[in-house]
């Protein structure tokens, strides 16, 4: 297998310590490649980067008409949130409004991503609940689909459950191609994840940005989801996170979402571009440097947006005594 | 720059999610290459993987005659310990015996690497001290050098301090070549780290394993350090860590030490081989899979040793609900 190019490197002192290879592609809805590097046909697991695609099942199955989901709920359905109070309280209410509780969630519990939230739990001697799971909003959305379909909620994370079939169908409709059983794994939150080329993910996001190639229902659903996510960027990730800061800075122009193991996807909405990238080794900081460089080049940032992006395109690294000893930086964009 | 080969990969479900490239080399003391992959001439920071080389300054500067360092103290001087009570208590006594305290350490404080030790501190509402720093034993050894040289201890971490000059000279003597200012950075614990090819690090460890090419003082010092480390493997790393488990299993035949950002170095002592490897992207779990595969192939493990190595050559990965969803595994060895 040919090696992808180095797209980020970690420098220590005056020498490069680590190299991070990867591939990226920026596309329009007609499938035209605006720019790319590396092998864009190698299938990769998108993980959480396509939660907004998965959330389209809420619209397909008329859950949104039944529960009149708020913009905040839709943003949480697209979120990898940090388990801050602003997130857990809203996901709790999201479930309550549907007559459910956190006991119905099958994502499992993990410590909040946010450090202060973790500390807060520790000081209260409380264990994290499934509400703190970064995927709890997505799972609440999937439970909404189950209720709207009139199927049992139990086992909704299973590949064979009607909810996951609906989610898979929504993703396939958006990218315009099929997902296959021979490229499937289980995500951190126990739902299936399907590998497809970053070319397909980027094309999907371009179609979502423009509505081109989508049926009217999907096109309207995507608009509602993208508007929700970009209106409530704090709900989609958390304090200080790239996704939150970028969407805050771009004020609706950019929908940006990271996924585990170095995946970044999104849309430059006003340009009608979708983009996707994968850091081959799964390093998240490196993938953030890469996507910041990509947006610096292709999203025409203003000065304030540029400052946010540059803070991720070159990230200082510090040692135990907090001395700056090097940096992670994007290269080759 | 040519790409190094993939030496580890992370699988999720039925698909490869991440790829980790790297280079490795196994050598003898005459500089003969037993086996290698990738670019073995690209200089890499060895980080903590060469603490046993750095500790040779203790012998050069007659600190060992002055303080009659115990085998445990020498093991701690080579250690990246996990901040367990077994470590912090001994480093504390190591310093006391020299009339010093943890206040003299310039490594900075960080949370113990060991989870139970971290939890213990939290329950006592105590902050970690410099004793918990994984490098505190190495720093105690460096303070021993300062005292034996009769120079001020303050600033002993600085590149220009006599202690670091002595450490650099010891490393250069072992690898048989010079380190250069244009390949230098600051390590996590604030001392300098110098990049050199993995070929040089492996050759150094082969010379250490055999004494060939070293002067009599260094040869004796290395024997004492390797014997100390392999006699007290728990002191060199910590509960459950690869370095500890491998050295326990091999009972003196293998000296193994990891360094930050995916470096692994060591010696197969009875064969007179040195080895070194670097995972290009700095992933530690991947580098552990790689070194386990290397030792499976070149260290002629017995059944018990094989079981330990195989547990690192293929490491299961679990999701939030502790379901096994994939594995990290070495490839290409």
Image (cartoon, coloured by chain):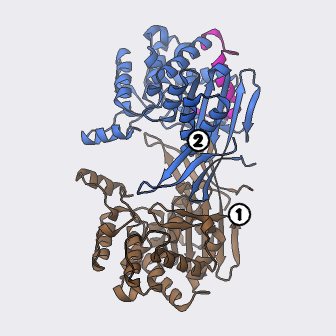
Chain colours: A blue, B brown
Query: Taken as a whole, is the magenta stretch helix, strand or loop?
Result: helix
Instruction: Give whichever of A308, A76 is nearer the camera.
Output: A308
Q: Is residue A293 left or right of residue B85?
A: right
Secondary structure category for the residue under label 2:
helix
Q: CA distance from mark 2 to mark 1?
A: 28 Å
Residue at image coords 43%, 25%: A154
Residue A319 vertical position relative to residue B169 in the rendered view, above or below: above
Q: Position of residue B123 (x, y in %)?
A: 24, 51
Same chain letter for marks 2 and 1: no
Instruction: Give whichever of A312, A260 is nearer the camera.
Output: A312
**Residue at the extreme left of the image, as rendered:** B124
Q: Position of residue A59 (x, y in %)?
A: 54, 13
Residue A3 vertical position relative to residue A84 in the rendered view, above or below: below
- Which quadrant of the structure image shows residue A279? top right
- In magenta segment, residue A210: yes
Residue at image coords 61%, 37%: A291
Residue at image coords 44%, 26%: A235
Q: Which residue is mark 2?
A: A313
Q: Which residue is mark 1?
A: B39
Secondary structure category for the residue under label 1:
loop
Q: Position of residue B144 (x, y in %)?
A: 38, 79
Q: Is residue A196 left or right of residue B265?
A: right
The span picked out in magenta is A193-218
Residue A47 seen: no
> For the residue carrying disc 1, how many other residues have a C-alpha within 10 Å: few (<14), some (14-19), or many (20+)?
some
> For the residue carrying disc 2, how many other residues have a C-alpha within 10 Å: few (<14), some (14-19), or many (20+)?
many
């Amino acid at each position: 297998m040919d090696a992808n190019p180095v797209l980020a490197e970690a420098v220590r002192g005056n020498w490069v310590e680590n190299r991070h290879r990867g591939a990226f592609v920026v596309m329009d809805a007609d499938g035209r490649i605006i720019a790319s590097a590396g092998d864009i046909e190698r299938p990769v697991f998108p993980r959480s980067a396509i939660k907004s695609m998965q959330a389209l099942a809420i619209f397909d199955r008329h859950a949104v008409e039944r529960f009149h989901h708020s913009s905040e709920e839709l943003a949480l359905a697209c979120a990898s949130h940090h388990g801050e109070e602003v997130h857990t309280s809203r996901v709790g209410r999201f479930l309550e409004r549907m007559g459910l509780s956190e006991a119905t969630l099958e994502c499992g519990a993990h410590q909040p991503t946010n450090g202060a939230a973790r500390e807060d739990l520790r000081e209260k001697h409380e264990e994290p609940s499934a509400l703190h799971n970064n995927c709890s909003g997505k799972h609440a959305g999937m439970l909404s689909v189950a209720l709207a379909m009139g199927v049992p909620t139990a086992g909704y994370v299973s590949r064979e459950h009607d909810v996951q079939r609906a989610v898979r169908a929504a993703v396939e409709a958006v990218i315009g191609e099929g997902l296959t059983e021979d490229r499937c794994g289980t995500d951190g939150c126990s739902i299936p994840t399907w590998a497809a080329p970053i070319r397909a993910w980027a094309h999907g996001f371009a179609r979502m940005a423009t509505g081109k190639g989508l049926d009217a229902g999907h096109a309207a659903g995507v608009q509602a989801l993208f508007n929700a996510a970009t209106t409530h960027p704090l709900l989609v990730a958390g304090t200080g996170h790239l996704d939150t800061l970028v969407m805050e800075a771009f004020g609706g122009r950019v929908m940006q979402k990271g996924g585990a193991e170095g995946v970044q996807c999104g849309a430059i909405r006003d340009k009608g571009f979708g983009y996707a990238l994968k850091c081959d080794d799964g390093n998240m900081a490196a993938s953030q440097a890469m996507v910041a460089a990509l947006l610096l080049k292709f999203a025409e940032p203003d000065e304030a947006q540029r400052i946010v992006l540059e803070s991720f395109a070159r990230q200082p690294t510090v040692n135990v005594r907090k001395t700056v000893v090097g940096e992670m930086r994007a290269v080759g964009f």
